[in-house]
Image (tube, grey):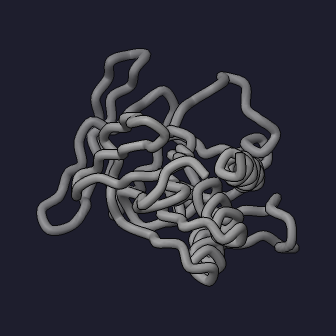
Amino acid sequence: MPGQNLDAEILIIGGGPAGLTSAIYATRARRKTVLIDKVMPGGQVMNTALIENYPGFPGGINGAKLASRFVEQAKSFGPDIRMDEAVEIDIEQDAFIVKTYSGQITAAAVIIASGALPQYSSPRPAPRRKILQGRAFANEKIGFIWDSVVTKIIGDKKVEAVELLNKKTGEVRTSPTEGVFVFIGNIRQVVSGAGEGATAAYYANKYLES
């Protein structure tokens, strides 16, 4: 087996669905597993209000609840889960030296499961986005302000309004509101992340067996 007297046989960087699934498969293969994430495990899925296309949940499930089940199942197999962030990876003979903010971790194999960065991949809405857009347009309680960005949140002890800049006309105006929810970007499919995590753990285990 590559690497002896190491902190981990398999080090997983990232605590989203992919990383947690890797941890499940790695620990079930009886590998000494360490998972690190710079925030609480769960990933971007925790910010999703409703996930309707993950198998096993007719009617859908709240993203935070699904993430908590991922975490609960992963922890049941005993991986070492730490809140830390990798800043550099070096290779020394047959071991990986991963430097983190709190120190360093040596591992025989490393799985990088840092997740999908928020991004806009296409101007054409994907089918899932079309479904959500249709629901939003049909909701009388939701209004839309197009071609504009928030440049300032106004308020003393609470939110009172936002300053908006129209990107097409350059017009700046103030819109009264009592709250602001910030969410920029999108996340990849949870099921694909879990599948990739399982595959990564499988090949990491095969590498350690060689």
**Which image quarter holds the C terminus?**
top right
Q: Residue furthest left?
A: 156
Q: Is residue 74 above or below residue 107?
A: below
Question: Would you say 22 lies left or right of 16 here?
Answer: right
- The image quarter containing residue 64 is bottom right
For the question of whether residue 89 can be seen, the reply is yes
8 or 160: which is nearer to us? 8
- Residue sitting at 72 percent across and 62 percent down? 51
Residue at position x 80%, y 62% in the image: 54
- Is 170 on the left-hand or right-hand side of 58? left
Q: Residue furthest bottom?
A: 76
Give coordinates of residue 154: x percent, y percent.
20, 51
Residue closer to the observer: 89 or 138: 89
Place of residue 20 in the rendered image (x, y in percent of width and height, measured from the top left): 60, 63
Residue 47 or 69: which is nearer the viewer?
69
Q: Is residue 126 left or right of residue 12?
A: right
Task: Judge whether 131 appears above or below 141 on screen.
Answer: above
Q: Position of residue 52 (x, y in %)?
A: 79, 62
With 83 as the anchor, is 126 left or right in this view?
Answer: right
The residue lying at 17 percent from left, 58 percent from top is 155
